[in-house]
Amino acid sequence: MNHLHATELQELVAIARRIGWGSADILLKVQHADLAIQDSADGPVTAADTAVDAYILNNLQASLGKQDFAYLTEETYKTQPSHERLAKPLVWVIDPLDGTKDFINGTGEYAVHIALLAGNRPILAVVVCPAAERLYFATLGGGTFVEHQHEAPKPIYVSQRNRLGEMTIVASRSHRNDRFVQLLQQFPVQQQRSVGSVGGKIAAILEQQADLYLSLSGTSAPKDWDLAAPELILTEAGGQLTHFDGTPPRYNQEDVSQWGGLLASNGQCHDVLCAEATRILGAIDGE
């Protein structure tokens, strides 16, 4: 099953879309309830995280089973022996609630991520933005689509903006250490807008409300479930997401953190901006 035909991929993405919409319904219903917030090393965890995680896993496994697939989720990976997923050619990577702080604070800027990896790269992705009532999905080589519930999907593409002065960076309100602030201050693109979740940031690029997203690890780094689904919906819509050295992320490794600098873009000036980020960081670190 490690080599999926197009028809098999379409069947799987239909299942993931249905589960994505079901996850959105759960989050919209519980967002005003008692969230039973718990602190963890990676940030707050709510009853919504665990409920949606269980919903996605239970539904995927009921539809597909465990024989051909492994499952890597934000809520369960610490208790799961890594060899179980590293040995499987097909791995579902799930973030039941990307942007938990925004969910808690009621900004609406949170998302659900569901991706399927073949080896170390995504071949199927669903990103749901429940508050915006939008679901984005992509398959490798099949393009990216956006849909509203009960409406036909439509293809979606990133902007063609290529003048740095007209471009906009979408950035996080938090996760800003001094090094990252200095990078933003010296970066050639200066227009900024803030959006909470990674899925929401990439959705803003798809909706042509922004053109770039920068990430720079500090004491922590984005994890596979933060990036795998957003990466594919971006690249299949014409964009790019790479480390600053131009290499794409490799997922389902022993370490699920994506260390270093990452740039997501509409693809128009990607290599130039990666080189500029590297140059700026070199100057900052050399001070």
Image (cartoon, rainbow, N blue to C red):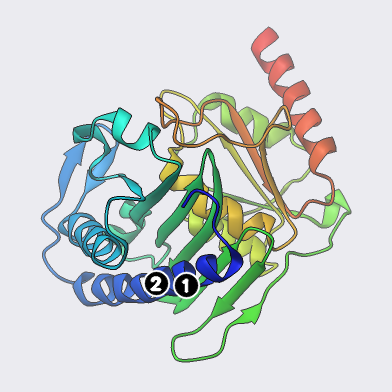
Going by the numbered disc 2, the residue's amino acid type is Ile
CA neighbours of label 2 inside 10 A, class few (<14), some (14 to 19), many (20+)? some
Among the 4 quarters of the image, the one containing residue 46: bottom left
Element on which disc 1 rests: helix
Kindly state the secondary structure of the residue where label 2 is placed: helix
Is there CB contact under 8 Å for labels 2 and 1? yes
What count of labels does the image hold?
2
Q: Residue furthest top?
A: 286
| Residue 176, above or below 178 | below
Q: CA distance from mark 2 to mark 1?
A: 6 Å
Disc nearest the viewer among 2 and 1: 1
- Res. 128 in view: yes
Query: In this image, 80 relative to 86: left or right?
Result: left
Q: Going 52% across and 26% down the picture, which residue do you hit? A: 259
Seen at 61% across and 74% down, the residue is 145
Q: Is residue 28 above or below residue 276?
A: below
Residue sitting at x 73%, y 24%? 278
Name the image quarter holding the C terminus.
top right
Q: Which residue is mark 2?
A: 15
Residue 226: x, y in percent?
A: 45, 46
Residue density around tag 1, few if under 14, some if 14–19, many if 20 or more, within 10 Å: few
- Asked if residue 47 lies left or right of residue 140, the reply is left
* Between 287 and 145, the one nearer to me in the picture: 145
> What's under tag 1, amino acid-wise?
Glu
Q: Please, which residue is most extreme toward the right here?
A: 163
- Which residue is found at the position 30% from the left and 75% from the top? 22
Q: Position of residue 236 (x, y in %)?
A: 68, 60
Residue 186 locus on image (x, y percent): 74, 32
In the displayed structure image, the side of residue 55 where residue 273 appears, left or right: right
* Residue where numbered disc 1 is placed: 11
Residue 173 visible in rendering: no
Q: Position of residue 60 (x, y in %)?
A: 30, 63
